[in-house]
Image (cartoon, helix red, strand yellow):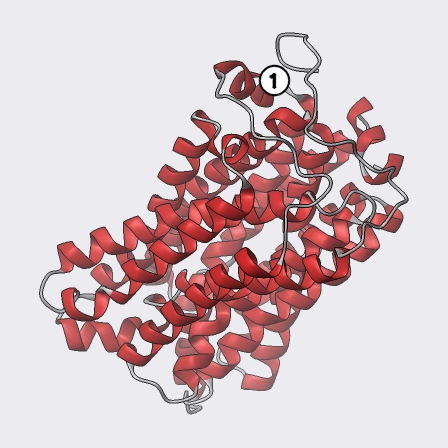
Amino acid sequence: MSPSGRKLKTARPEPVATERPAGQRRALLFIAGGQLLALTLWFSASAVAPQLQQAWSISSSQAAWLTLTVQIGFVVGALVSSVFALPDAIASRKLFTLAALIGAGLNLLLIPLGPRSFGAAFLLRFLTGVMLAGVYPSGLKAMAGWFRHGRGMALGTLVGALTVGSAGPHLIRGLGFEWQGVLVGASVLAAVGALILWFGVTDGPYETAPVSFSWQYVGAAVRNRGVQLSTFGYLGHMWELYAMWTWTAAFLGASALAGGYGDGWVPVATFVIIASGGIGSMVAGVIADKVGRTKVAGGAMAISGTCALLTPLVFATSPVLVVGLFVVWGVTVVADSAQFSTMVTETADDEYRGTALALQTAIGFLLTLVTIKGVPLLAESWGWRWAFPALAIGPALGVVAMIRLKRSPEAAKLAGGLG
């Protein structure tokens, strides 16, 4: 039903939930592959922040803003998208492709313009974030258009691809490339990702037809109880996720220095830690389809929050212990992410599904600004040993939201009634 109570007609009949449309596996591979490559843009500058400080003569605080501005740009882009219902008014593949190509170009401009003006670099990273707001939610919607049965697995795979892609620049840097090579590599990969999605896959049989903008869709998304509780859980998850991803390398470096160990292993270890979340996302998606989304999301947050609390105990110890804990954290910190998006696609009406996804991600990424900025402030005051335990607050509150959702009538819509 539409927000006005009028039933909307869909563009094509939907197959029953147990059918597996022809081309579904190809769509899973190509959409996830496109997302993986496009999301290398996110941390392309963050992965080489120490090198940029020297090459551009900027402070550590300014280097941190190269990450924060991407988050801010993403929030602005997602809010604009949700307010004007762009994900529901523009076909998912078209929005993804255009945003990824423009983002790749903006990222490439950092090479000639960044050393000349930090203001220009700031603006370019902000606009890149805006473009990523067109990539991520539209990728989720495109994948949901191909999957109804097994949607948790499909979106889990997509978020897994996002995770590996976000870690990609650290791997490029770990292979010995200088900052220019990392930026070029990320831009080329993002452009390839856009073309893969555009030419490699068509719109899915469950893709909702484009609709005309209506403020009623935004209001309906906000009032939907399932969307509300899913978003509350997502906020707890996002409080932790991007701060952990952003500052893991700094923590590892500080821990190695305090323990008297070398730090040449830190870039590759950071890639492994972040990328390990790709496995967590995919496995969690498969399990959630079988046992329920609220159980998997709540369990993942309980484990990841515990890891955050344990970080002071491994600080300055053997890198094997530190990396071991962080790999567990990396696996679980993002394992729940796709389930929050899947819950929205299952509880929101089709005509405002994309708007609800964009709104959820906008609010979540807005919250990341607090912890991305707050973690280094804690490190300055108390040292890196005590920088991460405060991140456990978010997962704790997220677990509460999942318990409430599991007990609500909306749980019947999740994972075929499994909650």
The crowding category of the residue bearing disc 1, from other C-alpha atoms within 10 Å (few below 14, some 14 to 19, many at least 20), is few
| Quadrant of the image containing the N terminus | top right
Residue 203 in the figure: left or right of residue 406:
left
User: In the image shown, does 252 or 352 lie closer to the viewer?
Assistant: 352
Residue annotated with mark 1: 223
- In front: 142, or 107? 142
Residue 313 visible in the displayed image? no
The part of the image, by quadrant, that contains residue 149 is top right
Count of marks overlaid on the render: 1
Measuring from the top left, give residue 119's x and y in whole percent.
14, 54
Question: Against 159, is 269 above or below?
Answer: below
Query: For this view, does 89 lie left or right of residue 48?
Result: right
What residue is rendered at 68% in x and 36% in y? 345
Instruction: Give the percent coordinates (x, y) of residue 372.
Output: 39, 53
Instruction: Return the residue found at the far top.
Output: 5
Name the one closer to the observer, 105 or 313.
Answer: 105
Image vertical order of residue 7 relative to residue 90, above or below: above
- Residue appearing at x 54%, y 16% in the figure: 219
Q: Secondary structure at mark 1?
A: helix
Residue 113: x and y in percent read: 15, 64
Q: Residue at x 42, y 55 (%)?
A: 100
Q: Position of residue 155 (x, y in %)?
A: 68, 51
| Residue type for callout 1 | Arg
Residue 141 shows in the view? yes
Please give left or right for residue 237 compared with residue 40 in the image.
right
Which residue ends up furthest to the left in the rendered image? 116
